[in-house]
Amino acid sequence: MVEFTPDEMMTIAASRLLTNDDVCFVGIGAPSAACNVARLTHAPDITLIYESGTLGTAPNVLPLSIGDGELCDTAVTTVSVPEMFRYWLQGGHVTVGFLGAAQIDKFGNLNTTVIGDYHNPKIRLPGGGGAPEIATSAHQVFITSKQALRGMVEAVDFYTSLGHGTGGNDREDTYGVKTKGPTVLITDLAVWKPDPETKEFTVVSIHEGVTRDDLQATCGWSIKYAQDVRETPVPTELELNTLRDLQSRTAIAHSL
Amino acid sequence: MSLQDAVAKYIKDGQLIALEGFTHLIPHAAAHEIIRQGRRDLTAIRMTPDIIYDQMVGMGCIKKLIFSFMGNPGVGLLKRVRDSIEHEYPSAITYEEYSHSAMANAYEAGAAGLPCAIFRGFLGAELAKVNPNIKHVICPFTGEKLAAVPSVQPEVSVIHAQRANKRGEVLIEGIIGVQKEAVLAAQKAIVTVEEIVDDFDDMHPNTCILPHFVVDAICVVPGGAHPSYSHNYYQRDNAAYKEWAAISADRDLFAKWMEDNVMSVGPEVFEGRVAHLRGAK
């Protein structure tokens, strides 16, 4: 029996959703780890793009920022930031946008801008960066988030980037957005997918050892479950070793 | 030209300036010179206000920020900027916020001499409600509603690059960010470089080079991007980035750090700061 942490389960569950055919616009942190575990296990031909302009990158260690030299050294090519956003993202070449967030609601709307009122903030967060356009230009969006009451909220304080809006077809009807938007949410406790009709995130698989009480205790909205809720397959030894090797190489590189 | 002379000559109080470098080639030495010369009331543009604008805000140089992501990359929040926004310390600043896509498009429009940038953006994003400069236009051919933002056209842009040659041409390699656009969009451009070489004769024909007639001042400051990095010269000082979180969090610690590491030294200290980071990349 292999021991693993909830964070490791989150990263590995996310990595499994990526394929060789994906062109993935990668956010920093958990998305970056998941994308590179996928690349180092079942999806060696995946194309990873970071917003600094590095296209088709294959870092040996995880970057501290989206613009580390490692990303450029291992990239197929490096383009300017305007080209990245205009041709590659807006041009429709990105199949998966992979985002994290400080706040997320049940429709996958994300907030990384502000807690409280925008003009009179309780906490000023870093802001949107690439997210507002990644969320609408990528063919679909994957989201990772650790579960916590202050992070998973009934309504986000600020729409940094659009998910499914108020649910249903709001995304297309109100905003004219034709891309799919958030298609999966991977947390440290479960995997969630939008209900086909309401677009509310519903739990489709629960990580080993996690109860429904655990899920609700760390989520600010009343959770709905898919009809057939499974247990998330535990990490394989290969997945776990790949992630841990990547993280230990990264720790050594970043301490130099 | 010395960095001291370039800043004294081109950067004035109250100007609209941009210091660019997207996680790479960040012009730290130039920012420190602006702080040392006591510039005030600057409107400062930067896609990613990180440590340099945290320092400039903390030292009271900036009255307004224009940005798209405000953080110490991969490490955390900018505590001096937050102190200014949340508690008006050392003074209040205002800010105008966009997305990366908007800023990148706005720089490109500035470089192209256009008054505004048009792109598919801010769909369902609330920034469009709180920033009156985010507007929309209808495509006259398809009827599609597109985002429009004013172009970025700084009075002065400042960047750091790997090297210049004796003709005054500037070479930028690696992650090139929006530096070319920032220089072309500006009325005046200051470039700090690692070194000056004879010529660029052995370069690839498509290399990113800024010709001499778009650059107003070239200043040799080895290590001038520290603690960010110069591709092929020295690596990023990740430890310094991580240390900044604690320095920035405390007003007194910040003041002492700035006195010791900025106010009482000059651009020549940067070379020593990168000595241990050279070699590998």
Image (tube, coloured by chain):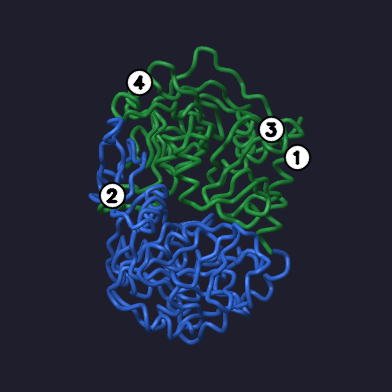
- Chain to which the residue tagged by mark 3 belongs: A
Per the model, the C-alpha gap separating discs 2 and 1 is 43 Å
Secondary structure under the numbered disc 1 in the rendered image: helix
- Looking at the rendering, in which quadrant would you find the C terminus of chain A? bottom right
Secondary structure under the numbered disc 2 in the rendered image: loop
Q: Which mark is residue B192?
A: none
Pointer 2 and pointer 3 on the same chain = yes
- Chain to which the residue tagged by mark 4 belongs: A
Q: Which residue is mark 1?
A: A241
Amino acid on which disc 1 is placed: Asn
Q: Earlier in the sequence, mark 4 or mark 1?
A: 4
Q: Which mark is residue A118?
A: 2
- Observer-side mark, 4 or 2, equals 4
Per the model, the C-alpha gap separating discs 2 and 3 is 41 Å
- Classify mark 4: residues with Cα within 10 Å, few (<14), some (14-19) or many (20+): some
Cβ atoms at labels 4 and 3 below 8 Å apart: no
Q: Earlier in the sequence, mark 4 or mark 2?
A: 2
Query: Above or below — where is B270 with respect to B142?
Result: below
- Chain to which the residue tagged by mark 2 belongs: A
- Chain to which the residue tagged by mark 1 belongs: A
Q: Colour of chain B?
A: blue
Cβ atoms at labels 2 and 3 below 8 Å apart: no
Query: Above or below — where is B226 with respect to A197?
Result: below
Spot occupied by residue B268 in the image (x, y as percentages of width and height): 56, 84
Q: Earlier in the sequence, mark 2 or mark 3?
A: 3
Side (left or right) of B243 relative to B32 = right
Per the model, the C-alpha gap separating discs 4 and 3 is 32 Å
Q: Which residue is mark 3?
A: A43
